[in-house]
Structures are given as structure tokens and as C-alpha cells.
Amino acid sequence: MKTTNGDYGDTSDWNTITYGHAALEDRCAPRLRVNIPATLRPSGGRGFQTVVVDLSLGGFCANSLQKMYVGNRCWLTLPGMEAKQADVIWWESGRVGCAFANLLSPIMHDNILARYRGDGVFRRV
């Protein structure tokens, strides 16, 4: 994590932060708008109901009225699936952007989209 003096502590923290930024800022995979009910649980906290509003192989954006802190871990649980670990990249105005600890497999990603295609999945062209 970035320390108060501006450095990144150790190499593993730098890699984690770099991966997170690449997953959400470099957009290593296209983001697709979705509307998927889910549960989001911050590390050390209680899970709460949310709606995932965009999804990619590398991460997601979801509603979060509860403040989430950059660098903290969280777990996203979509209906019928096990929790996926992620790191908080940003939180602003009731939305949180997270990078998955491990990229979603393309098959899992496609299955999620197929399952929710009727619930507001919009492909950008």
C-alpha cells in the first residue's frame, strides 16, 4: 500500500496496486454494463446487499453506500456462486470499483453474462 511518504512499502504491495490499476484503468478487458444483485463483504465487516453495475474479467463496479477504503480486500458473491476476492481500487459517491484478486475465467464471465442477459446486460459496440 502507498505509505504516507509516498512510497509503496514492499514489492508485493506495488504489484497489487499496479494490477488493480491495470484491471480497472488500463481496462485489460472490456467492461460490460450489467444489473446483477449480489452481496459485497468488506474485510473485517458484515456483508451487505448491492448491485453490480459493470463487470469485466478483471473487476467490477457496484453500488456501495457503505464507505469502502482503497486497498482493502472484499468478497463479491453473485447468486449461486462462491465469493470472489477483490481489492478496492476506488470508492466515490456510493459506488465502489474493485479488481479481482484472480481474473475471472472467460467461461465464468460468459456464463454470468448469459444468466443475466435479460436483466440489463448491454454490450458496448
Image (cartoon, rainbow, N blue to C red):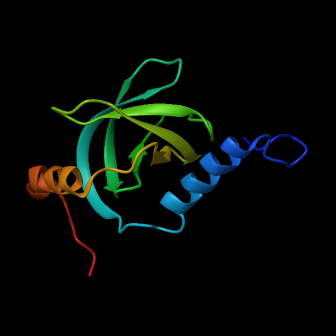
Q: Give me the residue at 56% from left, 54% from top.
A: 19
Which of the image's four quarters has the C terminus? bottom left
Res 104 seen here: yes
> x and y percent of residue 36 in the render?
23, 45
> x and y percent of residue 52 in the render?
32, 46
User: In this image, 70 relative to 1: left or right?
Assistant: left
User: In this image, 52 relative to 85: left or right?
Assistant: left
User: In this image, 23 relative to 89: left or right?
Assistant: left
Residue 29 occupies quadrant: bottom left
In this rendering, is residue 7 above or below 24? Answer: above
> x and y percent of residue 105 in the render?
27, 52
Residue sitting nearer the eye, 91 or 73: 73
Which of the image's four quarters has the N terminus? top right
Residue sitting nearer the eye, 4 or 96: 4
Residue sitting nearer the eye, 51 or 74: 74
In this rendering, is residue 82 above or below 12? Answer: above
Res 66 seen here: no
Q: Give me the residue at 54% from left, 42% from top.
A: 88
Residue sitting nearer the eye, 6 or 37: 6
> x and y percent of residue 91 in the render?
56, 45
* Farthest residue, direction right: 5
* Farthest residue, direction front: 11
Q: Tally the numbered discs.
A: 0
* Farthest residue, direction bottom: 125
Residue 64 occupies quadrant: top left
Q: Give me the residue at 63% from left, 56% from top.
A: 18
